[in-house]
Image (cartoon, rainbow, N blue to C red):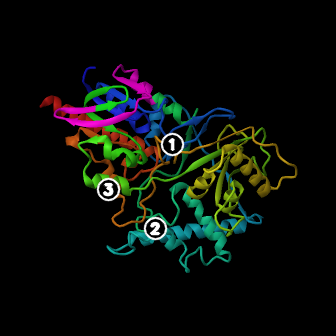
Amino acid sequence: MATLDTIIIGAGWSGAVAARQLAQSGYKVLVLEARERIGGRARTHTEGTHVPVDLGCSFIHGYKEGNPTKVIAKELGVGVDVTKPTESAIYGANGLLDASAANDLRDRLGRAHATARNTALNSTSLLPSSTTPLSAAFFDPDSALSTSSTPSTATAFARTLEVPFGAVLEQVSLRWTGWEDNFAGSDAAPHGGFQPLVERVLAAATHTGNTRVQLGETVLRIQEEQSGVNVSTDKGVYRAATVICTIPLGVLKRDAAHLFEPKLPVRRTETIQGTHVGILEKLVLTYSDAWWPKAGTVGSFTFLPSRTGGGEPKTADDVLASATLVVASFAGPSLPRQHPTLLFYLSPTPALGLAKFPLEEVTDAAHAFLTARFQPGTQPAKPTSSVMTDWHKDPLALGATTTPSIVGEGRSPLDFAELAKPLWGGRLGFAGEHAEMNHRGSVAGAVISGMREAERVNLLLTKLAEA
């Protein structure tokens, strides 16, 4: 095969964006993807659902606030639905909380989080220590949460933040709380789901005639040569002037030691091992009708634990009863096409607990849990279909996305900058949500890093051609 300009490893968001940009600049690109599909952690599920449901990334966060994914969708003619505000409800151990109690919980969590951010913003060189967790501030005896008339309820509500974090509060660093300058505000869902959008991005690259995509091909070694890079797979060996590696951080933790030749620098390998990959799973229950209360107006339900103490949960029912759970209802008016589907966002503790049980058992337990908490007048029919993700066990992901900086000596947001730095004179680049300091853990991070690497490689190839 003729020498390529760039080999891109991975056909997720960052790889697709980089391939499109380089192909449009006239460079010859080969995209190698170990999965038998395009999208990476963008996975859109359609089997047994009323409409496509995204099991990985779900929304373009900060759609009106500058997220570049908006521009890509528009360029490719992909429509989006901007979400509308909906009501939310909080269920305590004894049932639905009234508006006053629910608002008090939201206010107290907001104040506790603001205090933590202020502590971080005014941190000295020594305090708070990088080993001090966010939970230390949240659960301090004088915090807004601890001074609630029901501190255990307020503490349980704070665990809702473990969903976007992908980590428990005891893991997240207080020192770097609120450091990221990420996109937020408005959210939008692409028509048809995220996976088809990534497919459209790569199709735009292949339509130039400059890009080839090979699926089901596992990269075994990336080797620096005198004037290029060799990539060996389970199906062949390819040579290019440059390589962009978009392998997820969880997989790099497992494979980096034997994947690169020469080996990565010690600082890079230490950063790979020290940066945390979070756990966030989804459990989707599809129903024939929306039987839960206020289905037409409430878009999100939060369930606080109804079971405390008693040791390690031994059944799926125990796991659900012991956890703080956030459940999205697609029957609500947030998106134009309502449908009777409930989606559990599973933070690390319930995700790992439920992973021990088969899907059928988890589905039955989740349906029983909802029935007990909602207490409908008649027994609702069971779900018509269900699906639960296992990104943390998926060998090509080994986690959802990176988390905010975790506790640990030397850990900081600079870890994400280190993960993004090119090596081998610029011939080996890195992209992905883990390689973008301000937007880690998001579609925006993957997109921005892919765009950055494409521009950097473009400049490098131009320089090499002029040498």
Q: Distance between the residues labelled 3 and 1?
A: 23 Å
Q: In this view, does 358 lie to the left or right of 402?
A: right
Q: Mark 3 points at which residue?
A: 270
Which label number is shown at residue 427?
Answer: none
Label 2 secondary element:
helix
Q: In this view, does 162 lie above or below 389?
A: below
Q: Earlier in the sequence, mark 2 or mark 1?
A: 2
Quarter occupied by the C terminus: top left
Q: Distance between the residues labelled 2 and 1?
A: 34 Å
Label 3 secondary element:
helix
Comparing labels 3 and 2, the label whose residue is closer to the camera: 3
Residue 156, image x, y percentages = 63, 66
Q: Which residue lies furthest to the right in this view?
A: 378
Q: Name the residue under label 1.
A: 394
Circle 1: residue type: Asp
Q: Give the range drawn in magenta.
A: 201-230
Residue 119, image x, y percentages = 43, 72
Q: How many marks?
A: 3
Residue 193, image x, y percentages = 57, 35
Residue neighbourhood size for the residue with mark 3, other residues' Cα within 10 Å, grouped as few (<14), some (14–19), many (≥20): few
Of residues 268 and 165, the one drawn nearer to the viewer in this rendering: 268
Residue 416, image x, y percentages = 35, 53
Q: In this view, does 61 lie above or below 50?
A: below
Q: Which of marks 3 and 1 is nearer the N terminus?
A: 3
Q: Is-magenta flag for residue 415? A: no
Residue drawn where x is 34% and y is 74% of the image: 124
Residue drawn where x is 36% and y is 31% of the image: 19
Q: Mark 2 points at which residue?
A: 117
Query: Quadrant of residue 285 in the image?
Result: top right
Circle 2: residue type: Arg
